[in-house]
Image: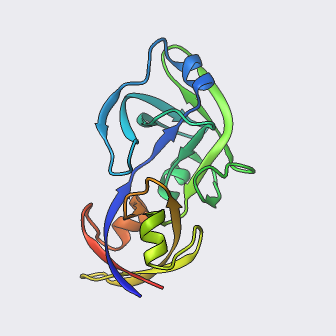
Amino acid sequence: MKEKVSINISARHVHLNEETFKKLFDKELTIRNSLNQIGQFAANETVTIKTDKGSFENVRIIGPLRSYNQVEISKSDARKLGINPPVRKSGNINGSEKVTIATNKGEVTLECCIIADRHVHLNTLDAKKLNIVDDEPLKLAISGVKSGIIDIKAKVSDDGFFEVHLDTDDANAFLINAGDEGILLK
């Protein structure tokens, strides 16, 4: 299988559950702009993520609110924060790194920080057509000045929008811009 796919770059961000959001804000989560993944959005609200060794301000919340709390960063971000988060599929926060999420209202310290695994989103119909199952290891061929082939995993959901998500470190390593295309290989 060789399938052309758009690449999107995932910068540091957080997912919050309702309980944590209420500890950090006295308002509702509001939409700044919709994302390609159906029903998901970048919120107007931001937080600071910090450790004893460093911090990042204005980290965007990705909505809607989830059933879990998660901070997704790159390895470069982790170095500034002085932590070593595991590379994981989104939602798998067991054994992840502890960080503090703060706003003017308050802060919470949670074991919730990961480096997201490289992945390609597919809806269930596209996955069936391409004979791909959730979590299946795949390859992404990247062309250009710094071309290469990297490992990615399938992330299948009913409302998935067909695109690859790479973090800023991966995008920078291959000189990728949001909207560039790669070839999905099985």
x and y, in percent, of residue 104 in the image: 48, 16
Q: Is residue 166 above or below residue 184?
A: above
User: Which residue is rendered at x = 59% and y = 31% of the image?
Assistant: 17
47 horizontally vs 163: left or right: right
3 horizontally vs 18: left or right: left
User: Which residue is rendered at x = 50% and y = 39% of the image?
Assistant: 14
**Farthest right residue?**
95
Q: How is the image coloured?
A: rainbow
Q: Is residue 13 above or below residue 46?
A: below
Q: Is residue 8 above or below residue 13?
A: below
x and y, in percent, of residue 80 in the image: 51, 48
x and y, in percent, of residue 170 in the image: 41, 67
**Farthest bottom residue?**
1
Q: Quadrant of residue 19?
A: top right
x and y, in percent, of residue 182 in the image: 32, 77
146 horizontally vs 81: left or right: left
User: Which residue is rendered at x = 64% and y = 26% of the image?
Assistant: 108
Quadrant where the N terminus is found in the figure: bottom left
> Is 107 in front, or is 93?
93
User: Which residue is rendered at x = 56% and y = 56% of the image?
Assistant: 115
Tally of numbered discs: 0
> Is 159 in front, or is 173?
159
